[in-house]
Image: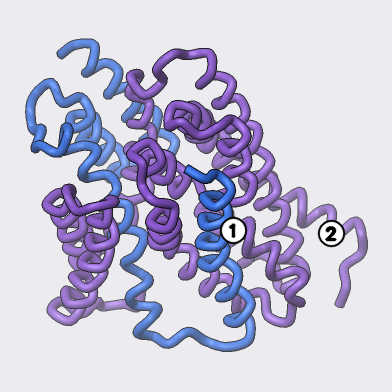
Chain colours: A blue, B purple
Amino acid sequence: MNEFWLLFGMAVATMATRIPVLITLSRRELPTSVRRALHYVPPAVLAAIIAPIVLLDEGKPYVALDNAMLAASLIAIFVSWRTKNLLLTIVLGMAAFLVWRALF
Amino acid sequence: MPLSPSDRKQHFLAGARDTFPLLVGAWPFGLIYGALGIASGLSPLATAAMSAVVFAGSAQFIAVSLVAAGTPVLVIALTTFVVNARHILYAATLAPQLKGLSTRWLAPLGFWLTDESFVVAAKGFEERATPHERKWYLLGSELAMFLNWQIATWVGIAAGQAIPDPASWGLEFALVVTFLGMLVPMLKGRPELISVLVAATTALLAINLPHRSGLLLAAVLGILAGLLAEKAWPRKEPA
């Protein structure tokens, strides 16, 4: 692993999502179709990141009572749905995870 | 019209102040990133430098897990782009409210733009009429986030070196709950829900594709599913 090229590649990739659009669109508008598609990027990416961590174990489905991540995720989803409070969701979700893991 | 030095300071500090709750929320995140960076085999210097030159928490998390799995650099860079693509939407939303600013201002404001500062700015800009007030406000928010993230990373690196196997603590679950807390409020209608279900299912089925490319496939199919669902159930109000 060449750390210089890792950092360089990631820095360029990240800047490409943040800087050019901020500069060009302070002068003109983005097409509606592109805006519509971008609207789904955050939820789709977040879901695609989370699902395998929670529901798989070494590539195999892991739906069981002793899957503390799954149990705590369901609790976190409920807390977030009812309160929309990010900090509360993190704290209660993390607590639920640690308690569940100690119990099962 | 240029602002007086005291006005600049006032807007800058307001931006930092309004960001405070998110600074607290970023701390466990930064700590765990630092510890996992060390556990993935990255050097302490590279782990710290990534927080400084990339400055994108979720992408940094994914990257260190890919590093641990021996993924090629080019694939990590591509994945970083997809994971960060949501910033394009943030930039597109803020840009019209920063009309007339020079590239000298817009480039650094773009470099430091994160989920957190976007959320703060989307609200704070409503109370500020001119791009010049807004730029100082956004800069205050962004620099507070940036400094906070560096310090949390350094502490996490120190902890990662002191604790033998941080991954076994299950602390990566902090990433899952943080993302769930951001994701659930985004599910405002059926198209968003369908997009998320398709993306999650694809990510599960495609888990064995090389270099975690299932993540990219899942993102693309999730977006397409959302757009198709919009046609089936047109929304009543513009999002």
Q: Looking at the image, is B124 positioned above or below residue A97?
A: below
Q: Quadrant of residue B66?
A: top left
Please name which of the two marks, 2 or 1, marks the residue nearer to the observer.
1
Name the quadrant of the C terminus of chain B.
bottom left
Q: Quadrant of residue B192?
A: bottom left
What chain does badge 1 belong to?
A: B
Of the numbered discs 2 and 1, the one sitting upstream in the chain is: 2
Callout 1: SS: loop
Q: Residue at x 92, y 59 (%)?
A: B5
Q: Looking at the image, is B173 positioned above or below residue B109?
A: above
Q: Residue at x 70, y 49 (%)?
A: B143
Q: Residue at x 60, y 60 (%)?
A: B121
Q: Which residue is mark 1?
A: B113
Name the quadrant of the N terminus of chain B.
bottom right
Q: Quadrant of residue B154?
A: top right
Residue B8 shows which numbered tag? 2
Q: Is any part of residue B115 visible from this angle? A: yes
Q: Nearer the viewer, residue B225 or B83?
A: B83
Q: Nearer the viewer, residue A64 or A8?
A: A8
Is B9 placed left or right of B213 in the picture? right
User: What kind of residue is marked 2?
Assistant: Arg
Is B128 placed left or right of B126 in the picture? right
Q: Residue at x 29, y 51 (%)?
A: B211
Callout 2: SS: helix
Q: Nearer the viewer, residue B47 or B223?
A: B47
